[in-house]
Image (cartoon, rainbow, N blue to C red):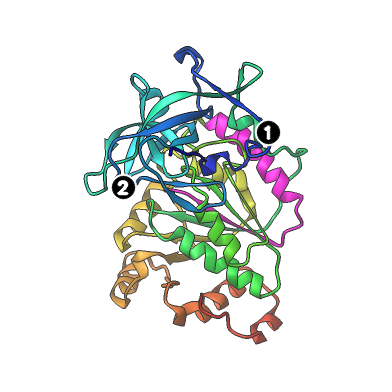
Amino acid sequence: MSRKILGSLARITDFHQQPYEVHALNRSVWANGDYVEGEITGARSELYNVECTTGEMIPVEAGDRIIGAFGHRAATLEGAGSWMEIDGGEMHAMTGAGLFGRFTSYSKLLPRPMSLRYVGHVTRNGNKICMSDFALQADARTFDVPTILLVGTSMSAGKTMTGKFACQVLSDLGYKVIGSKLTGAGRYRDILRFRDHGAAEIYDFVDAGLPSTVVPDKEFRTAIRPLLSFIAGRSADFLVVEAGASPLEPYNGAAAIEELGDNVHCLILCASDPYAVVGVQQAYGLQPDLVAGPATNTSAALDLVDKLTGLSGINVIDPDTLPEFREFLIRTLSLDAQLRALPETPAA
């Protein structure tokens, strides 16, 4: 028996509580961020799983229907595509969250992506429903929350892993921490890890009404500014922010950094290897306070980072380094020295 599942891009909606209809609409009115229903087609592969509104991964098969949203993706290690490339209603789930489009370039190292058939748009009273209809709203206010910013040399560079430990350390020290992801392609799992490791509240660009941040600069800033205003009103001591992908990829990472401005009190660069640290430094002019990620996996890697850049690194996935990471945050954020007497942060 077929099922209907809300992908996690629909977690900001009221679809669980309020009725809606599904109608096929003319291609001329399709747009980024539209909520649509797709019917799964093709033989199952390892990627036939949907991230639902709670973040749980649900196995699916042909005939099941998914509510997701049109968007764009430009992942360096996995695939690139867009809703604009959908041909004849045949499309892909470009992420497990229900980011719908059609891949035009896809890694041969991955299983075959989930295929779907466009069924129709989610509508009410004849009008299509879009992610922007549910975006967080807030009165404009100055964003002034001290921020720990995590940027990467690419996707899968260790940003979420490092960010969750930053949330853990700061919350264990008694601070109210908000965790956020300002750029990337829609998934819920990353900021859920921040919540699981001590963040009191979590928000991302989906809350701002974007399925991914592969959008024009002006559209990104217009969506993100109310989110930052909202966060500024939540009385947090610190904001831990992950910028998905790298600043040079088309996810608006550079714009996100500019929007955060002088509130970035700690910049951590998560790198895939030591040479990638040099690449981001030279290409974007970043001067991080710390290097983390796979570029710090071994002592040889750490030595090479130091030799190439003069920067220090910490392999945060090693439980033995958590006290060192804690001391780094205390020092870099100029936290009260008496906090050094608190028990060491336990390993996750």
Residue 18 is labelled as 1
Residue 295 is labelled as none
Please say if 16 is above or below 327: above
x, y (%) of residue 56? 50, 53
Residue tagged 2 = 77
Name the amino acid, label 2.
Leu
The structure residue drawn at horizontal position 65% and vertical position 30%, both measured from the top left corner, is 19
- Quarter of image, res 248: top left
The structure residue drawn at horizontal position 52% and vertical position 50%, both measured from the top left corner, is 188
Bounds of the magenta span? 217-245
Does the magenta portion include 243? yes
Kind of element beneath mark 1: loop
x, y (%) of residue 177? 66, 62
Kind of element beneath mark 2: loop
Residue contact at pointers 1 and 2, CB within 8 angstroms: no
Residue furthest to the left in view is: 108
Residue 76 appears in the picture as rendered: yes
Does the magenta portion include 162? no
Residue 334 appears in the picture as rendered: no
Q: Nearer the viewer, mark 1 or mark 2?
A: 1
Nearest the camera: 161 or 4? 4
Mark 2 nearby-residue class (10 Å; few <14, some 14–19, many ≥20):
few
Q: How many marks?
A: 2
Image-based side of 243 in relation to 61, left or right: right
